[in-house]
Image (tube, rainbow, N blue to C red):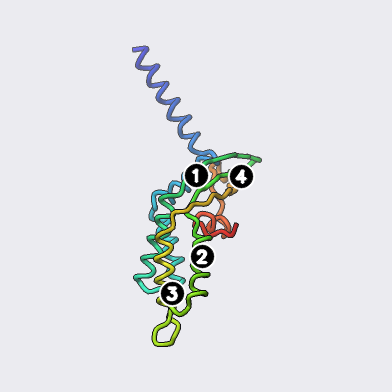
Amino acid sequence: MKKSYWLIGLLFLFLVTGCGMSNTPSTKVEELLKRYNNNADVVKTELGDYLSSLDLDDDNQKDYEDIYLRQYSDMTYEIIDEKINGDNAVVTVKVKVYDYYTAEKDINDYISTHQNEFYDNNVYSAGKALKYRIGELKKVNNRTEYTMDFTLTKVNNVWTVDTLTNEQLEKIHGTYAY
């Protein structure tokens, strides 16, 4: 009987400390990054809202969605540091993502130096250029690494990641100018 109480007590201790451990700044940042890795519905919705604002046709929007969902799925990360100051914290993370920044530069250079390839009946075709861009982005395998600081705030004893900045989003997308 004593063993049962001891095991129940140990299980309770594990559950209490386990729950407390999931409310650390580093754990909250890791949960956020895992949502990207797993292409969680909230991430897909935010991406869809952004892509809808670009006024792309359905096929091109789907292609861009595939490109960025691949980026999220294949992103790797390592938590480097955590600093807590009262109800504020900063978690430093290294992320490794596909290097779409360099790819975009190369794509733009190619389009500008080979404009004749993107004409239909002597008229520049933005659609042709877009198809080329999407095709090249789908081929990207080179990666780059960024260091990011995530800020968090503790409200009612719960850590929450502050709204991501444009710079952070560009780094997650691999489009940040380095």
Against 15, residue 157 (above or below) is below
Amino acid under label 3? Ala
Q: Are marks 4 and 2 in contact (CB under 8 Å)?
A: no
Q: Quick check: marks 4 and 1 in contact, CB under 8 Å?
A: no
Label 3 to label 1: alpha-carbon separation: 33 Å
In depth, the one of 58 and 160 nearer the eye is: 58
Q: Residues within 10 Å of mark 3 (few under 14, many from 20)?
A: some
Which comes sooner in the sequence, label 4 or label 2?
4
Which residue is under mark 1?
A: 77
Marks 3 and 2, the one that precedes in the sequence = 2
Q: Nearer the viewer, mark 4 or mark 1?
A: 1
Q: Residue at x 53, y 57 (%)?
A: 169
Determine whether 105 is above or below 73 in the image: below
Residue 24 place in picture, x, y as percent: 53, 38
Say which residue label 4 marks: 90
N-terminal of the pair, mark 4 or mark 1, is 1
Q: Amino acid at mark 1?
A: Tyr
Q: Residue furthest top?
A: 2
The amino acid marked with disc number 4 is: Val
Mark 1–mark 2 contact, CB under 8 Å?
A: no
Residue drawn at point x = 55 percent, y = 45 percent: 94
**Mark number, residue 3:** none
Instruction: Give the distance between the C-alpha atoms of the residues marked 3 and 2, in whole angstroms.
Output: 13 Å
The spot of residue 176 in percent (x, y) is 56, 58
Helix, strand or loop under label 3:
helix
- Compare marks 3 and 1 and give the one earlier in the sequence: 1
Select label 3 or label 1 by which is in front: 3
